Image: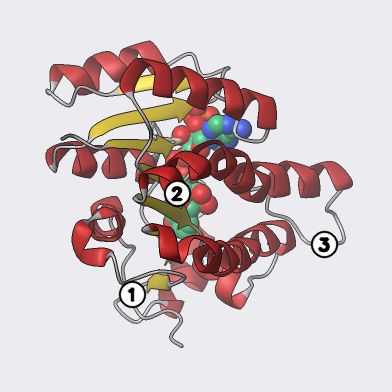
Amino acid sequence: MRRVALVTGGMGGLGEAICVKLAALGYKVVTSHSPSNAKVGDWLQTMNHMGYGFSAYPCDVADFDSCRDCVAQIEKDLGPVDVLVNNAGITRDMTFKRMTRNHWDAVIRTNLDSVFNMTKQVMNGMTDRNWGRVINISSVNGQKGAFGLTNYAAAKAGMHGFTKALALEVAKKGVTVNTISPGYIGTKMVRAIPREVLESKILPQIPVSHLGKPEEVAGLVAYLASEEAAFVTGANISINGGQHMF
Ligand code: NDP
């Protein structure tokens, strides 16, 4: 039986690597994208030309009703979601002094409310079937904080509390809930950081002296989604080149 894996933000740097890895392992992979994303057709064509067989559905992860409608359609078309990877996210980095309510809300809604919005749609099905995996992509900056990231650090730290609390509630039902906290990974989100900031401020903080690769995060997702990871729940797994250890 091929399990269905839903990866939010699958067209992004980490999301695409996660979709590719899960497809290679035999999952039926479906991703969601922003309703305004005009590149989805080209992306799907390119990926499916390579043989991945992805499906993609529009969904604003910050909007509960959009998530409800999206997951209902996916389950109708492909079957129940067995693995949910809450990966979609945005940044609006700036000092607290400059941050407006809109900057705060956008990041909390997209990075944290989204985890509730999506998980809510799939959890009853997972517990009814006695099997499920929820994997939340958080950040090293939710573990240790970072200058100019009060909104993002708060959202990503919130994921940890959500993960641990929900893991307790569903543990007896064969459903695991875990968080992965990547450090700086070489995706578009990180390449948007000015080069001089990356070289003078960020790389010197990373003991291995280079950015991580999306494929390395995807490998962890694949492990947490697997049968072998049934005993791992409520965990937060760091993948950060030694930048932050505890
Ligand atoms: P990208 O910017 O490349 O991808 C983000 C994805 O999120 C896009 O596919 C985007 O879809 C989707 N997205 C954003 N807003 C919405 C929305 N409202 N509704 C639906 N989808 C949305 O980022 P990365 O791949 O780098 O990051 C992926 C995740 O990993 C994020 O949660 C990020 O915080 C986290 N992370 C990344 C790190 C890194 O170093 N790159 C480090 C630590 C954590 P669309 O293009 O369709 O808008």
CA distance separating discs 3 and 2: 40 Å
**x and y percent of residue 229 in the render?**
26, 65
User: 110 above or below 11?
Assistant: below
Q: Which residue is pictured at 58% across the width and 47% down the height?
A: 115
Identify residue for label 3: 96
Q: Amino acid at mark 3?
A: Phe
Q: Which residue is pictured at 59% across the width and 42% down the height?
A: 120
- Considering the numbered disc 3 on the image, is that residue within a helix, a strand or a loop? loop
Of pointers 1 and 3, the one earlier in the residue sequence:
3
Of pointers 3 and 2, the one earlier in the residue sequence:
3
**x and y percent of residue 223 in the render?**
24, 60
Q: Amino acid at mark 1?
A: Gly
Q: Which image quadrant is residue 102 in?
A: top right
Q: Residues within 10 Å of mark 3 (few under 14, many from 20)?
A: few
Say if mark 3 contacts mark 2, CB within 8 Å.
Answer: no
Numbered mark located on residue 127 in the image = 2
Identify residue for label 1: 241
Mark 3 or mark 2, which is nearer to you?
2
Q: Is residue 154 visible?
A: yes
Numbered mark located on residue 190 in the image = none
**x and y percent of residue 8 in the render?**
46, 37
**Closer to the camera in the image, 88 or 149:** 88
Left or right position of 219 against 93: left
- Considering the numbered disc 1 on the image, is that residue within a helix, a strand or a loop? loop
